[in-house]
Image: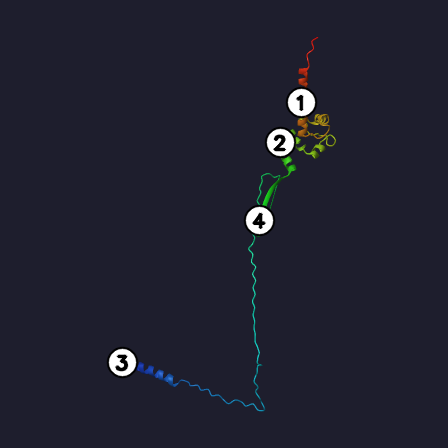
């Protein structure tokens, strides 16, 4: 069996050699042969391009870039003004530029709204006369409730109705009373009483 393997190896070697030699024998050799150029008949003169002396070719490219970058300004935040009072109007504002910012805020109280709320609070506690008296501090309401119009006069010194009207004309000359006027009249009344007592003490007793 050894000689069979040897013959097989020999056969394979011869076959490999034949393939290599066959490939080399059948290689294609290409030869390019240039043909003759076609002649141009007739008079033909080829000229050359001539550049004049002193010619200058100049190319200039200029790039200009300008950047103007500014940072965004800071934000001036207007203050937030909250209030539990529904009669308070909150106003706030802010101004800002690239260097400085200013902001401010303030509360504004609506006096009419506040008067109505105070009157409601007094009425809710059962003090109806005081509640109406708070509203009567407004001249328009006082005139509207007077005898000349609604004939439901505002309370004066705790009196209502006809008694209040009587006090109004006898003590205040028909003008809307104020707390300052009331104090002035009461102080004058007290002062007059003191002077009366002093006069009575100085006056001698006459015995008959």
Q: Determine the residue located farthest toward the top in the rendered image.
A: 208
Image mark for residue 122: 2
Alpha carbon of mark 1 to alpha carbon of mark 3: how far? Answer: 159 Å
Above or below: residue 7 compared with residue 89:
below
Alpha carbon of mark 4 to alpha carbon of mark 3: how far? Answer: 105 Å
Find disc 3 in the rendering and name its residue.
6
Alpha carbon of mark 2 to alpha carbon of mark 1: how far? Answer: 34 Å
Q: Where's residue 88, x and y in %?
A: 61, 40
Alpha carbon of mark 4 to alpha carbon of mark 1: how far? Answer: 60 Å
Q: Where's residue 167, x and y in %?
A: 71, 26
Q: Quadrant of residue 51?
A: bottom right
Q: Earlier in the sequence, mark 4 or mark 2?
A: 4
Using a 10 Å C-alpha cutoff, classify the residue at mark 3 as few (fewer than 14 neighbours), some (14 to 19) or many (20 or more): few
Above or below: residue 25 compared with residue 99:
below
Asked whether the residues under the numbered discs 2 and 3 touch, taking CB atoms below 8 Å apart as contact, a structural biologist would say no
Using a 10 Å C-alpha cutoff, classify the residue at mark 2 as few (fewer than 14 neighbours), some (14 to 19) or many (20 or more): some
Find disc 4 in the rendering and name its residue.
101
Query: Circle 1 — which element?
Result: helix
Give me the residue at 64% from left, 29% from top. Answer: 130
- Tell me the mark number nearer the camera, choosing from 4 and 2: 4
Give me the residue at 66% from left, 30% from top. Answer: 133
Alpha carbon of mark 2 to alpha carbon of mark 3: how far? Answer: 132 Å
Q: Where's residue 61, x and y in %?
A: 56, 70
Q: Determine the residue located farthest toward the bottom in the rendered image.
A: 42
Query: Foreground: 131 or 48?
Result: 48
Q: Earlier in the sequence, mark 2 or mark 1?
A: 2
Q: Earlier in the sequence, mark 4 or mark 1?
A: 4
| Residue 155 is at least partly visible in this image | no
Alpha carbon of mark 4 to alpha carbon of mark 2: how far? Answer: 46 Å
């Amino acid at each position: 069996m050894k000689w069979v393997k040897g013959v097989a190896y020999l056969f394979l070697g011869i076959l490999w050699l034949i393939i290599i030699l066959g490939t080399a024998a059948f290689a294609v050799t290409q030869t390019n042969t240039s043909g003759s150029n076609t002649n141009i008949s007739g008079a033909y003169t080829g000229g050359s391009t001539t550049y004049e002396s002193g010619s200058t070719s100049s190319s200039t490219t200029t790039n200009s870039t300008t950047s103007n970058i500014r940072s965004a300004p800071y934000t001036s935040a207007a203050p937030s003004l909250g209030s539990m009072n529904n009669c308070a109007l909150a106003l706030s504002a802010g101004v800002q530029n690239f260097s400085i910012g200013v902001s401010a805020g303030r509360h504004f109280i609506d006096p009419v709204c506040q008067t109505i709320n105070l009157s409601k609070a007094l009425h809710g506690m059962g003090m109806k006369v005081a509640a109406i008296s708070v509203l009567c501090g407004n001249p328009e309401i006082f005139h509207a409730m007077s005898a000349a119009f609604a004939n439901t006069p505002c309370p004066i010194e705790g009196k209502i109705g006809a008694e209040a009207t009587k006090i109004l004309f006898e003590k205040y000359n028909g003008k809307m009373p104020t707390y300052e006027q009331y104090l002035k009249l009461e102080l004058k009344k007290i002062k007059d009483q003191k002077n009366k007592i002093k006069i009575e003490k100085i006056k001698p007793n006459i015995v008959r």
